[in-house]
């Protein structure tokens, strides 16, 4: 089940998952335009644990990494 969580809610959810004995994996990226490489990365990360947390770079971070015309999609849409 995919959910968008605040930082505090994420910390609570991760703590509950760990308390239940589940493992957590983290994947991070810009994910500006989703492509097959992203999908493979996310599938591989998910295979490492019971739960996968995906962190999305903020718009300013994407601009710094990719240039002034990026991101194509704002963080809320990614």
Image (cartoon, rainbow, N blue to C red):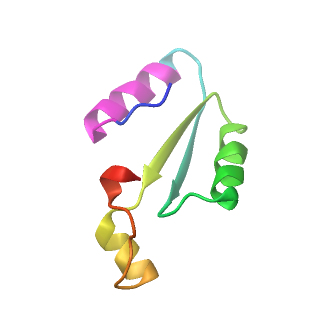
The outermost residue toward the top is 20
Residue appearing at x 38%, y 71% in the figure: 71
Residue 28 vs 2, above or below: the answer is below
Name the spot of residue 28 as percent of width and height, x first. 51, 55
Residue 77 vs 43, above or below: the answer is below
Residue 71 vs 69, above or below: the answer is above
Question: Total of numbered circles in the picture?
Answer: 0
Q: Nearer the viewer, residue 20 or 73?
A: 73
Residue 22 vs 45, above or below: the answer is above
Q: Is residue 1 left or right of residue 56?
A: right
Q: Nearer the viewer, residue 43 or 74?
A: 74
Q: Nearer the viewer, residue 16 or 39?
A: 39
Magenta stretch prevailing secondary structure: helix
> Magenta stretch?
5-18
Magenta stretch encompasses residue 39: no
Residue appearing at x 64%, y 27% in the figure: 50
Name the spot of residue 77 as percent of width and height, x first. 36, 51
Name the spot of residue 41 as percent of width and height, x first. 68, 53
Name the spot of residue 14 as percent of width and height, x first. 44, 29
Residue appearing at x 40%, y 61% in the figure: 57
Residue appearing at x 29%, y 41% in the figure: 7
């Amino acid at each position: 089940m995919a959910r968008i969580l605040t930082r505090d809610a994420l910390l609570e959810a991760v703590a509950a998952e760990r308390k239940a004995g589940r493992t957590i994996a983290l994947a991070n990226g810009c994910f500006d335009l989703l492509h097959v490489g992203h999908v493979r990365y996310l599938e591989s990360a998910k295979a490492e644990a019971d739960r996968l947390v995906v962190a999305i770079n903020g718009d300013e971070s994407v601009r710094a990494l990719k240039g002034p015309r990026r991101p194509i999609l704002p963080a809320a849409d990614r």
